[in-house]
Image (cartoon, rainbow, N blue to C red):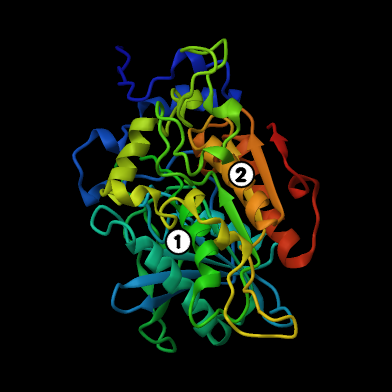
């Protein structure tokens, strides 16, 4: 009996086989290399209906899952996952987060596993709220940013009465886990109005199409931008944001393979990241792009990332705007914004950006910019920043936190423990400091 020949669409580059986490290497060879990438196909919104990325963990049990429309004009929705247990004194803390998908793919259902993990985690114990922001290319920049702001304002305005949340304990975050099931089926009890409904997880069906498409962390990008925008909102928020959780984020939309970082942001990058070593191609000491060291990484290739970028940011002039590339945020945004009111000391200054936890894959093209943003936050805002580098990990490790990848499980656990530290003062070894993480 003849063996069926399978087409390899994503071969591994020889220079990376010895560098990759062994579990990822095995799974890539058996599964991922046969998956078609969307940037090689003609654009169609139906690309968003691809099968879930293989290797992810299943959703965890929560006491309720509710949808709310936060902007009637745009149709923007949020989905709230409430954990088991009694409402804490003062209300539930909130983790407001944004799915991955390169601003192009993904949906409100993309992050059910990660959301329920954050809500369900015994230490984090929070309401996790996912945002169904508008997608490119139909809705390019700044539509997703506008939807992020709408979601935050809705939580501060409606969250206490709808969900028993504490608006003084809101963290924002973005993850990189594109899993896109078929359209969801909702059941709306008569007791609920048209603005929200209950989702029964068992009603979510995955299409038979065997294709599974990649992502980049637009979610981390939007979370970082929202953390910058929050102190600038008028009228001011009831309380400042308490935290930003950025998982393999897109931070610099000018980054490339060959062009050195833009002069405005080059000082945030480590020189070892942007200069050629004696053992690398080119002349020793020659400047290179922030993506160069991981140019041949699997899954999120430079070509794929540029496809996402062109969908969301078709105008090149927008690439350097700080609400597209947080690394370009003016230093004064980090130091606090004067609101013009006097107090006993003279001027009241709105809070700086919140403390941050940033997780990056060592072999991700986005690694250097994530580390650079941590440096910017420390240097200009003076906030506590914890940067974790996951060794041997390319971009999609978070989506492989099921039985496939131990280091993916570790990243998700570390993220939950970082929230536990912020919301409840629970300190763990995994979130206590900067460092490198092995499986």
The C terminus: image quadrant: top right
Element at label 2: strand
Q: Which residue occupies the foreground of this view, 309 or 65?
A: 309
- Picture coordinates of residue 155, whole percent (x, y): 52, 77
If the image is split into quadrants, where does the N terminus sit?
A: top left
The residue positioned 57% from the left and 39% from the top of the image is 267
* Secondary structure type for disc 1: helix
In x, y percent, where is residue 19? 58, 20
Left or right relative to 220: residue 46: left
Residue highlighted by disc 2: 359
Residue 402: in sight, yes or no? no
Question: Is 431 displayed left or right of 33 in the figure?
Answer: right
Q: Earlier in the sequence, mark 1 or mark 2?
A: 1
Q: What is the quadrant of residue 146 in the picture?
A: bottom left
User: Which mark, by number, is residue 394?
Assistant: none
Report the disc number at residue 202.
1
Q: Farthest residue toward the front?
A: 346
Would you place residue 20 above or below residue 367 in this image?
above
Q: Residues within 10 Å of mark 2 (few under 14, many from 20)?
A: many
Given residues 389 and 91, the one toward you in this image is 389
Q: Residue at x 49, y 19 (%)?
A: 286
Number of other residues with Cα within 10 Å of mark 1, as a class: few under 14, some 14 to 19, many 20 or more: few
């Amino acid at each position: 009996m003849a063996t069926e020949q399978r087409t390899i669409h994503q071969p591994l580059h020889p220079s990376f086989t010895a560098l990759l986490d062994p579990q990822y290497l095995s799974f890539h060879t058996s599964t991922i290399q046969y998956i078609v990438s969307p940037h090689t196909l003609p654009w169609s919104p139906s690309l968003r209906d691809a099968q879930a990325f293989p290797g992810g963990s299943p959703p965890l049990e929560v006491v309720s899952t509710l949808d709310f429309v936060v902007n009637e004009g745009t149709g923007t929705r949020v989905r709230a996952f409430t954990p088991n247990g009694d409402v804490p004194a003062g209300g539930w803390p909130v983790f407001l987060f944004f799915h991955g998908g390169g601003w192009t793919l993904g949906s409100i259902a993309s992050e059910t596993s990660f959301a329920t993990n954050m809500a369900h985690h015994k230490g984090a114990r929070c309401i996790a709220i996912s945002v169904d922001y508008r997608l490119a290319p139909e809705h390019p920049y700044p539509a997703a940013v506008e939807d992020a702001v709408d979601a935050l304002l809705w939580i501060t305005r409606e969250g206490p009465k709808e969900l028993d949340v504490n608006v003084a304990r809101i963290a924002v975050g973005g993850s990189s886990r594109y899993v896109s099931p078929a359209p969801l089926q909702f059941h709306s009890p008569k007791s609920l109005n048209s603005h929200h409904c209950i989702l029964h997880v068992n009603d979510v069906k995955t299409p038979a199409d065997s294709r599974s498409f990649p992502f980049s962390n637009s979610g981390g990008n939007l979370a970082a931008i929202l953390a910058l925008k929050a102190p600038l909102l008028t009228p001011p928020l009831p309380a400042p944001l308490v935290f930003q959780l950025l998982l393999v984020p897109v931070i610099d939309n000018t980054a490339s393979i060959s062009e050195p970082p833009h002069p405005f942001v080059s000082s945030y990058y480590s020189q070892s990241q942007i200069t050629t070593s004696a053992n690398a191609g080119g002349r020793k000491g020659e400047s290179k792009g922030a993506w160069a060291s991981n140019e041949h990484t699997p899954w999120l290739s430079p070509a794929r990332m540029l496809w996402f970028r062109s969908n969301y940011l078709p105008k090149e002039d927008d690439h350097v705007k700080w609400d597209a590339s947080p690394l370009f945020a003016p230093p004064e945004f980090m130091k606090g914004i004067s609101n013009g009111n006097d107090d006993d000391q003279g001027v009241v200054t709105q809070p700086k950006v919140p403390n941050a936890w940033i997780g990056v894959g060592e072999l991700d093209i986005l690694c250097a910019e994530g580390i650079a943003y941590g440096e910017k936050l420390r240097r200009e805002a003076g906030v506590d920043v914890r940067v974790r580098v996951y060794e041997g990990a390319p971009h999609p490790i978070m989506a492989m936190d099921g039985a496939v990848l131990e280091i993916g499980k570790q990243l998700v656990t570390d993220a939950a423990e970082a929230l536990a530290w912020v919301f409840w003062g629970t300190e763990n070894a995994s979130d206590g400091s900067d460092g490198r993480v092995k499986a």
